[in-house]
């Protein structure tokens, strides 16, 4: 009997009603995350990555709303929970790591007070036990002299150390799932590597499921077990990390991979995807990538491709169905 996924997202659609019509920002997105797995969600700015994460934990800014689909955490449906109940789930069973740690930390309180309050809110423990738990958490995420730093304020930490404190806060209640939204963007490369190591250790030692949202393929390659590539609100390719990085199928994914410099490539110029992500008010018919695609076919302009199994991956591209049809012709 296979273990149920920690998170199951089915046909998730997020839209924004406006006076000029309804704008669809996340369109029919489905995926699962298993215990101890890191799922990387990657794509350009505006692809819908962060909105997907916000929808999962119920932090959509009005007028944004989930218009269809469902989100289940260990089998329990959470997208239609009352706000107070979802707030308890969000703190206890789902942790969140945001891009800017200063948005997650109150500058008026010591980091120890913030972690201790979080621990005591979600666990029936004494103040002394909560304080020790806070010290243990700071030690786990690699903050030296944790007992002394407990009484420091956020501004007394460097950017990388603040991000570690935020990860400690996200882990305070022992969540089943952590959603990390661009957790390394504002950090230098050496600190990025340290934060990535913390996230990987969480998975290995605690069995925590992680959704890592980023536009940095280097971070994905170092951290993720599987990758979902998003474009204009939809997943265009999802599969194991090695398959997506080494043998991408969708033209957009291949473009992303081609834009990453490697030591062995020997090219003077990197590959470039022409154009830019379409606005929500102007998403093309058919495949949203068709105006930028060098392999566009007539059906790409009128028929929206659905995710199709290709090896261990799934790809939303008419090239896959066309190639399969040709392969079956005697």
Image: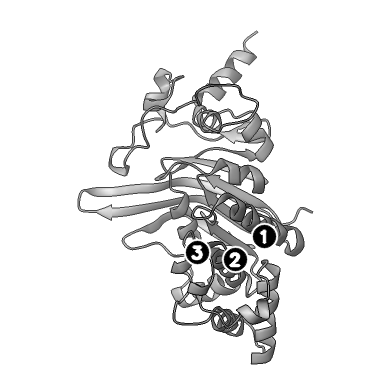
In this rendered view, identify the residue nearer to me: 266 or 44. Answer: 266
User: Based on the displayed image, in which of its 4 quarters is residue 34 positioned?
Assistant: bottom right
Q: Position of residue 60 (x, y in %)?
A: 40, 62
N-term-proximal mark, 1 vs 2: 2
N-term-proximal mark, 2 vs 3: 3
Q: Position of residue 44 (x, y in %)?
A: 44, 41
N-term-proximal mark, 3 vs 1: 3
Please, what secondary structure does the residue beneath circle 3 have?
A: loop
Image quarter (top left, top right, bottom left or bottom right) of the N terminus: bottom right
Read off the residue under disc 2. 164
Please, what secondary structure does the residue beneath circle 1 have?
A: helix
As displayed, is residue 295 above or below residue 117?
above
Q: Position of residue 258 (x, y in %)?
A: 54, 28
Read off the residue under disc 1. 198
In this rendered view, identify the residue nearer to me: 186 or 31. Answer: 186
Which residue is drawn at the image coordinates 60% and 20% (left, top)?
Answer: 324
Answer whether labels 1 and 2 touch (C-beta < 8 Å).
Answer: yes
Between the residue at mark 3 and the residue at mark 1, the CA separation in whole angstroms equals 22 Å
Please, what secondary structure does the residue beneath circle 2 have?
A: helix
Between the residue at mark 2 and the residue at mark 3, the CA separation in whole angstroms equals 21 Å
Read off the residue under disc 3. 57
């Amino acid at each position: 009997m296979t273990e149920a996924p920690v998170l199951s997202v089915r046909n998730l659609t997020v839209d924004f009603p406006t006076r000029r019509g309804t704008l669809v920002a996340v369109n029919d997105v489905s995926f699962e995350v298993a215990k101890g797995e890191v799922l990387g969600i990657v794509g350009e700015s505006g692809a819908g990555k962060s909105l997907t994460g916000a929808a999962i934990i119920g932090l959509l800014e009005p007028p944004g709303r989930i218009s269809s689909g469902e989100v289940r955490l260990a089998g329990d449906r959470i997208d239609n929970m009352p706000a107070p109940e979802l707030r308890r789930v969000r703190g206890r069973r789902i942790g969140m790591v945001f891009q800017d740690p200063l948005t997650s930390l109150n500058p008026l309180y010591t980091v120890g007070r913030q972690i201790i309050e979080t621990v005591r809110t979600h666990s029936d423990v004494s103040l002394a036990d909560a304080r020790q738990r806070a010290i243990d958490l700071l030690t786990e995420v690699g903050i030296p002299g944790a007992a002394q730093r407990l009484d420091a304020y956020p501004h007394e930490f460097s950017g990388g150390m603040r991000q570690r404190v935020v990860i400690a806060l996200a882990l305070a209640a022992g969540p089943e799932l952590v959603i990390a939204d661009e957790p390394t963007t504002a950090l230098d490369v050496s600190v990025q590597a340290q934060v990535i190591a913390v996230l990987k250790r969480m998975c290995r030692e605690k069995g925590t499921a992680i959704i890592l949202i980023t536009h940095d393929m280097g971070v994905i390659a170092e951290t993720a077990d599987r990758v979902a590539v998003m474009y204009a609100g939809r997943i265009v390719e999802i599969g194991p990390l090695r398959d997506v990085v080494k043998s991408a199928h969708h033209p957009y994914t291949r473009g992303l991979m081609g834009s990453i410099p490697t030591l062995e490539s020997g090219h003077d110029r990197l590959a470039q995807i022409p154009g830019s992500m379409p606005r929500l008010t102007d998403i093309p018919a058919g495949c949203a990538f068709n105006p930028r695609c060098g392999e566009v076919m007539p059906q790409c302009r009128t028929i929206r491709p659905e995710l199709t199994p290709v090896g261990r991956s799934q790809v939303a591209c008419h090239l896959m169905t066309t190639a399969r049809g040709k392969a079956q012709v005697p």
